[in-house]
């Protein structure tokens, strides 16, 4: 199945580190919010030494880490789920920030219509410089309109 970003099938261009996503069960309207990285740590031998590298993750076939969701995907079939990319992120911190933001603003932990049962995030303010700059531009644009 395909990932969609802004209602268009997404093709990875190598620019972003990861993404925050929404998976929707089309049979019962349950949802799941999560984050996924385009690459993962790996190792290879170079001149007899072990070297740390980044290699592509399983993001194209990924359906979340929630066991109930994965069981439903297996039982109902991938065609009964829609996978949407909400945010393309340039760092782990951006992914963690936007995943946390979406889970909290949608009240996903309190709502039975969500598969989400827990959240974990490690976010540093100084890792969010790009996000802060984007928000500052948005606030300045909105102030100019008023």
Image: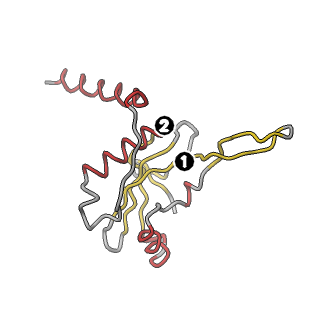
Say which residue label 2 marks.
Answer: 91
Q: Say which of 12 and 117 sits in front.
A: 117
Counting from the top left corner in percent of width and height, residue 44 is at 76, 45
| Residues packed near mark 2 inside 10 Å, few (<14), some (14 to 19) or many (20 plus) | some
The first of marks 1 and 2 along the sequence is: 1
32 relative position to 56: left or right: left
Above or below, comparing residue 127 to residue 4 in the picture: above
Counting from the top left corner in percent of width and height, residue 43 is at 72, 45
- Which quadrant of the view contains residue 129? top left
The residue depicted at 47 percent of the width and 79 percent of the height is 75
Q: Residue furthest bottom?
A: 75
Q: Quadrant of the C terminus?
A: top left
108 relative position to 67: left or right: left
Say which residue label 1 marks.
Answer: 11
Q: Are marks 1 and 2 in contact (CB under 8 Å)?
A: no
Q: CA distance from mark 1 to mark 2?
A: 18 Å
Instruction: Label 2, secondary structure: give it.
Output: loop
- Which quadrant of the view contains residue 54? top right
Q: Tag on residue 131?
A: none
Colouring chosen for the image of the structure: secondary structure
């Amino acid at each position: 199945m395909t990932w969609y970003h802004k209602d268009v099938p997404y093709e990875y261009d190598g620019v972003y580190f990861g993404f925050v996503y929404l998976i929707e069960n089309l049979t019962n309207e349950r949802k799941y919010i999560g984050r996924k990285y385009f690459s993962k740590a790996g190792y290879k031998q170079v001149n007899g030494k072990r070297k740390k590298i980044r290699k592509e993750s399983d993001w194209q076939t990924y359906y979340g880490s929630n066991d109930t969701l994965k069981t439903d995907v297996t039982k109902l079939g991938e065609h009964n789920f829609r996978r949407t990319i909400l945010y393309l992120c340039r760092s782990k911190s951006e992914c963690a920030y936007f995943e946390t933001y979406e889970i909290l603003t949608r009240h996903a932990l309190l709502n039975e219509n969500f598969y989400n049962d827990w959240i974990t995030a490690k976010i540093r303010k100084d890792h969010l410089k790009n996000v802060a700059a984007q928000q500052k531009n948005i606030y300045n644009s909105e102030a100019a309109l008023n």
